[in-house]
Amino acid sequence: MRRPPAEGNGHGGGATSAHQRTVDVDGHAVPTDSEGYLERLDDWSEAFARALAREEGLALTPQHWELIRFLREYYQTHAVQAQVRVMIRHFTRVWGPERGSNHALHDLFPRGGPQKQGNRLAGLLRTKGEH
């Protein structure tokens, strides 16, 4: 997994700024920015995703995990985060046009859609332009 880029990189600075909160993961405090994005990509684990989802009031289903794993694999392969249109194209092919639609993906991740909430749960950086 790549290391987070330096500050001033267009990722909102959350990856390298002093952490503003932590997520309790099996008794360990994992530092995140104020919105729950990891400060260090290497701190991600499935336990982190479960803990953050619990804090966000989201019960993770197999469908959530499939999207989280897709986001992580896409990032590892391409060194960039998947755009929503890439997710829609992939999941429309895999799940069908109704379940893979933009609306369905946003219903799956109600706090910011797959681009924000999905990336947070996948342990990826804040996307460019997020505040």
Image: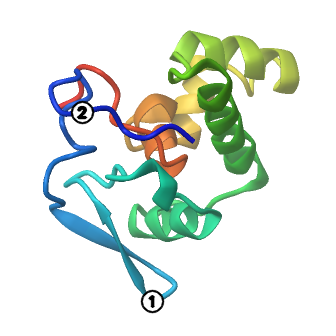
Q: Say which amino acid is labelled 1.
A: Gly
Q: Position of residue 89 (x, y in %)?
A: 71, 11
Q: Is residue 67 above or below residue 99?
A: below
Residue at screen point 24% across, 28% down: 130
Disc nearer the start of the sequence (2/1): 2
Q: Quadrant of residue 23?
A: bottom left
Name the image quarter holding the N terminus.
top right
Q: Is residue 6 above or below residue 77?
A: below
Between residue 23 and residue 100, name the one nearer to us.
Answer: 23
Q: Quadrant of residue 60?
A: bottom right
Residue at screen point 56% across, 23% down: 103
Residue at screen point 18% across, 36% down: 13
Q: Position of residue 86 (x, y in %)?
A: 63, 13
Between residue 11 and residue 53, name the one nearer to us.
Answer: 11
Q: Say which amino acid is labelled 2.
A: Ala
Q: Which mark is residue 85?
A: none
Dot 1 falls on a residue whose secondary structure is: loop
Closer to the observer: label 2 or label 1?
A: 2
What colour scheme was applied to this rendering of the protein?
A: rainbow
Dot 2 falls on a residue whose secondary structure is: loop
Whether residues under marks 2 and 1 lie with C-beta atoms below 8 angstroms apart, the answer is no
Question: 10 Å neighbourhood of mark 2: few (<14), some, or many (≥20)?
Answer: few
Q: Position of residue 127 (x, y in %)?
A: 34, 27
The residue identified by callout 2 is 6
